[in-house]
Amino acid sequence: MRFVELRPTPEGETFRLHPRITWLRGLDPAARVAVVGLVHDVALGEMPDWDGTVDIDGETMSLADGIDVLGETADNALIVDAASLPPVTTVPDTPVAPVAPRESLESATEKLTELEERIAGLAEELAASGKVRSGMTAHLVSASARVDDDAGRRLDRADGELGRAARLASRPDPWTGMADVPARLIELRAQVDELEMSLAALPSGDRPALAAAVATARAAISRGSVPSPEAAALAQAWTSLHQRLTGLESRMEAAGGGTEAVAARLDAARAAARAAEDAAVPRPITEEEADRLETLHEAMLAAEQRAGRGVRRAAGRAAFEKAEAALRDALAPLGYPTWAAFRMGNGMASVSQEALDEYERSQAELEAAEIELAQLMARLERDTDLQDVLTAIDRALDHARELLGDEFFDDVSGGDAPPADPAIVREALEACTVDAASIGVGREAAIAHLREAMTAAGAGGHEHLTSDAALVALGESWLGVLGAADEAAVRMLRDRERAVAELAALEELGDGTRVDRLDEERAAVRAAEKDVAETRDALVEVVEARTQLHVLAATELNLAEEHDDRLLQRESAQVLVDLATRRLDGRASADEAAALADRVPRGIGGPIPVVVVMGASPAAMLDRLVVLPDDVQILVIGDGLGIVEWIERAGDDTAAMVDVGTLV
């Protein structure tokens, strides 16, 4: 059985292999592991992630069909460490006496034992790390569930209502006349100090720059469709801008002049005005209601006549009063105090002075709310911070429209306006993909830039990672940390600003001499403050949990890299032990190739290809394996010395080289 062509990904390039010896040059450690894993899967009769074609007994078929034909061939493929094969110094058929066979076997066995112990230890560490990660993840989920997204808005609305109530009461400050101003001052100063320390402890970094670096590095180590670096950076910028917008809106809400508070007051004023108008202006009487009033009036007159003529005047009087009350109860809801008023159509006479006064007040409140809204619009136009953010969002929206297309916005918002939920645009940008080949950035340059971006963003743990894929995964982990930190910072900045403003007002107030209070509004603020404090603590826990998970991810990735390296070393060490054992048995080195051939797994369609890990070994090490049977295909991995010269010496019929630096 021979590999004819291999294709790492469905959209990737197909590589043609030499039927005898193919030298795969330029593979990074992850790609080497992938090649070894491919051959292992074939030996086990399992379908690998790769696709391709194979030759079995002269018949070319797909890799999947070939595996069905071969079935399970062995427990493992044959992996040979070229460094364990000394170069040929004599004629292959001439026996070479073993040199210190006993010492060689003991040394090789000792190294294999050490590797086995280290592999077992690494496996235990990874398992223990997995348990810790599960606990951390559960804590992160618990902390996230305690984040109340509406707590901040409730506090902002309560602050606004307290300030508005104070203004209506002609109060200079809503907190004037507190029971214990000194205690509140101490509380506010401690809160400001705590928020300053928490803000300083939050991780910070350029999220768009890091997102672009992560996506570029992913494209450089991948083939086919990958996330767009440009769209990934824009998604982070879009989210960051809307977080800033939320903070600015929250600041205005706290002053009682935010769009939400003003709009709520305008709606309430309109509803109150409608209710007062209904109470002050009686509605028209329907024909059915008029007929009922006529019936009740006639019943009252009849009862009055009976009461005047009856012998039992007391009983008759009670019936009359009952009929009179029924008529009066029917007239009152319609706005008429008496039957005469109804007959004269004088409904306004039934409207109380309180209802008329309330109508006038509601109209004044409505007018004031409309003026307040107009003033808010003018103030928003003058707010430079807000206008800068809105301008940046408009630019980001234009950029998003270029990447996503007008059709996307037509579908999600039905026009030029963006969707009400910014997450819709962010998720669409994160889903944008491009062809990895179109990035045009080399692998080394992209990885170096990613390391620089992670260092600039304060991400630790990447210094000792050698796998490019692991580095990309760690970069994505830190993006999550920065996102959670920015979300917490928005809330903390808002809380600090609010505390500083109240602190300044109370310090200017001094002891306070007024005793009038707005207890109901203050109680609502206190309750909302408690909710916000709990949410703020939960946000900090989310950031801490994400940071701990990031550190743990860096540790696990390092352990996994070492574990994979030790597995490869164990394969090589096992070959050394086998060679030393054969030398101890007195076999000549010329027979070593034949002994290796015996170890090659064979299926119905012939031997499974042998993988040779060269490392930096000289190409001459392969001379020992050239004498393997012609039906054994050999895949050589590594950048050994003298590759080109060796292949030229072996001839095109024997070997070929494929430079596959981007194989996986």
Image (cartoon, rainbow, N blue to C red):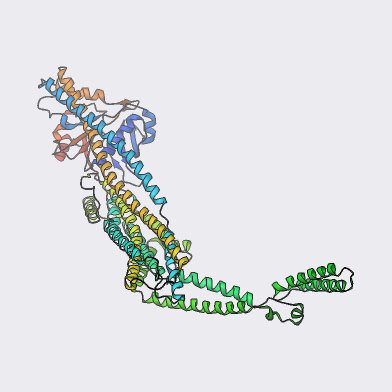
Residue 130 horizontal/vertical position (percent): 32, 39
Quadrant (top left/top right/bottom left/bottom right) for the N terminus: top left
Q: Is residue 620 left or right of residue 542?
A: left
Decide if residue 610 is in sight here.
no
Residue 116 horizontal/vertical position (percent): 23, 29
Q: Going 25% across and 32% down the picture, which residue do you hit?
A: 121
Question: Going by the picture, which residue comes out furthest to the top?
Answer: 585
Q: Quadrant of residue 5?
A: top left
Q: Is residue 606 left or right of residue 587?
A: right
Give the vertical position of 21 relative to 461 (above or below). Answer: above
Q: Quadrant of residue 408?
A: bottom left
Quadrant (top left/top right/bottom left/bottom right) for the C terminus: top left
Give the vertical position of 632 relative to 375 (above or below). Answer: above
Decide if residue 562 is in sight here.
yes
Residue 578 horizontal/vertical position (percent): 20, 23
Viewer-side residue, 408 vs 363: 363
Q: Going 34% across and 73% down the picture, which residue do you hit?
A: 509
Residue 620 horizontal/vertical position (percent): 13, 33
Q: Quadrant of residue 317?
A: bottom right
